Amino acid sequence: MEGYTFKLPIQLRYSDFDMLGHMNSAQYATLIELGRLRYFMHIKWDLSEVSNVVASFKIDYLKQIIPADEVVVYVKVSSLGTKSFKMEYLLASPDDKTMFAKAETVQVCILKKGNVSTAIPESIRAAIKSYENL
């Protein structure tokens, strides 16, 4: 997918689907959350001292996901602030022909000790800039 370097295949589970036979809307957020966590692991952010929280979350549902679908989540950081950063996501088919949802979050960095906002660590800022070519 153009503009995204991180891609995670998702294994769907029976419990992801509701009685109507499509994915429950809350599960989209869970898939996005998994993609976000794996992105952080990929750039080697251990989250032990400085973590981040979701300050804003927006999802556009484009097409229902049914049990027969295969899904990948694309993740990228699209902008960096001082204490916050914007992430964008796509849920798509592996061949990129079907877009199921697009989403964006604003993440705010926090110190785990004291639970207060803090600047994005320089090592993480550098890792994101390098990975995303920002």
Image: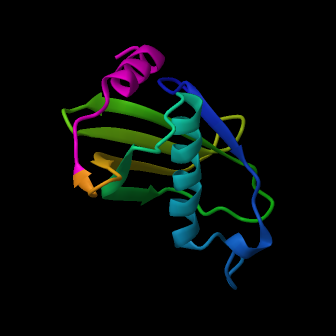
The colour scheme used here is rainbow
Q: Position of residue 49 (x, y in %)?
A: 40, 44
The foreground one among 108 and 99 is 108
User: Can you name the residue that lies furthest to the bottom here?
Assistant: 19
Q: Position of residue 95 (x, y in %)?
A: 71, 34
Does residue 97 lie above or below 115 as drawn? above
The quadrant holding residue 21 is bottom right
Does residue 69 lie above or below 85 as drawn? below
Quarter of the image with the C terminus in it: top left
The quadrant holding residue 41 is top right
User: Can you name the residue that lies furthest to the left here?
Assistant: 82
Q: Is residue 134 left or right of residue 2?
A: left
Quarter of the image with the N terminus in it: top right
What residue do we see at 18% from left, 33% from top? 82
What residue do we see at 51% from left, 45% from top? 36
What residue do we see at 72% from left, 65% from top? 66
Q: In this view, does 16 lie to the left or right of 84?
A: right
The quadrant holding residue 77 is top left
Q: Where is residue 60 in the image (x, y as percent from the top left)?
A: 42, 57
The foreground one among 34 and 78 is 34
What residue do we see at 52% from left, 54% from top? 33
Does residue 51 lie above or below 1 as drawn? below
Q: Is residue 78 left or right of residue 34?
A: left
Bounds of the magenta segment: 117-134
Q: Position of residue 76 (x, y in %)?
A: 45, 33
Does residue 126 lie above or below 81 as drawn? above
- Residue 65 painted magenta: no
The foreground one among 128 and 58 is 128
- Residue 123 painted magenta: yes
Q: Main secondary structure of the magenta part?
A: helix
